Image (cartoon, helix red, strand yellow):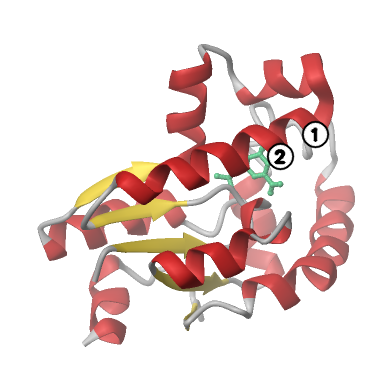
Amino acid sequence: MKNIYLLGFMGCGKSYIGKGLAQKLGWEFLDMDDFLEANEGMTISQIFAEGGEKLFRELERNYLHATYDFNQTVIATGGGAPCFFDNVDWMNTNGQTIYLKTPVSILVNRLEKETAHRPLLAGKTSEELHQFITNKLVERNPFYEKANLIFEYQTGLETANDLFSLLN
Ligand code: S3P
């Protein structure tokens, strides 16, 4: 298997669980947002401020395609990445995709303190966050659910071991 792409909404634990999974597999780990920011020399908030979401999505697709050159890497994608262009089909063709499906209540709890560096969430109250996530999931689930595998969080305390078991 070449690479594993982890998909799912902001706050679903793609980086956290992805690092653990990479360790268990003896693979590398790559966070797509960090990869993009390091190469552009700008934060995601700066990119949104400069060229809007349109510029960000184009860059995101370019850096996604750049992961073609990686091998045996667990890749945490940005929450919106599978939902633009043909990105999810591209990932299904070029690697194994796993959707980390997470209840809205767990996402709200985790994201409440994490809105500052996420331009789509900045300034939202916890109620607004709940509404926003609920609506976005309706829009995004058809893309996320194209993943090869779905890993469903029940408690939010699941670990990389649980995800690893799904693969075996
Ligand atoms: C986004 C999710 C973020 C980041 C950007 C947009 C989204 O990534 O790519 O702020 O559209 O859901 P994380 O899922 O890693 O927070």
The residue at the point 87 percent across, 52 percent down is 127
| Quarter of the image that includes the N terminus | bottom left
Ligand 1 visible in quadrant: top right
Q: Give the amino acid at mark 2.
A: Arg
**How many discs mark residues in the rendered view?**
2
Tell me the residue that label 2 is attached to.
57
Pointer 2 with pointer 1, Cβ within 8 A: yes
- Residue 92 visible from this viewpoint: yes
Q: Examine the image and state in which quarter residue 74 appears.
A: bottom left
Q: Which of the labelled discs sits on residue 89, or is there none?
A: none
Tell me the residue that label 1 is attached to.
53
The residue at the point 29 percent across, 78 percent down is 162
Q: Is residue 77 above or below residue 63?
A: below
The residue at the point 86 percent across, 55 percent down is 132
Cβ of mark 1 under 8 Å from ligand 1: the answer is: yes
Q: Position of residue 168 (x, y in %)?
A: 21, 87
Q: CA distance from mark 2 to mark 1?
A: 6 Å
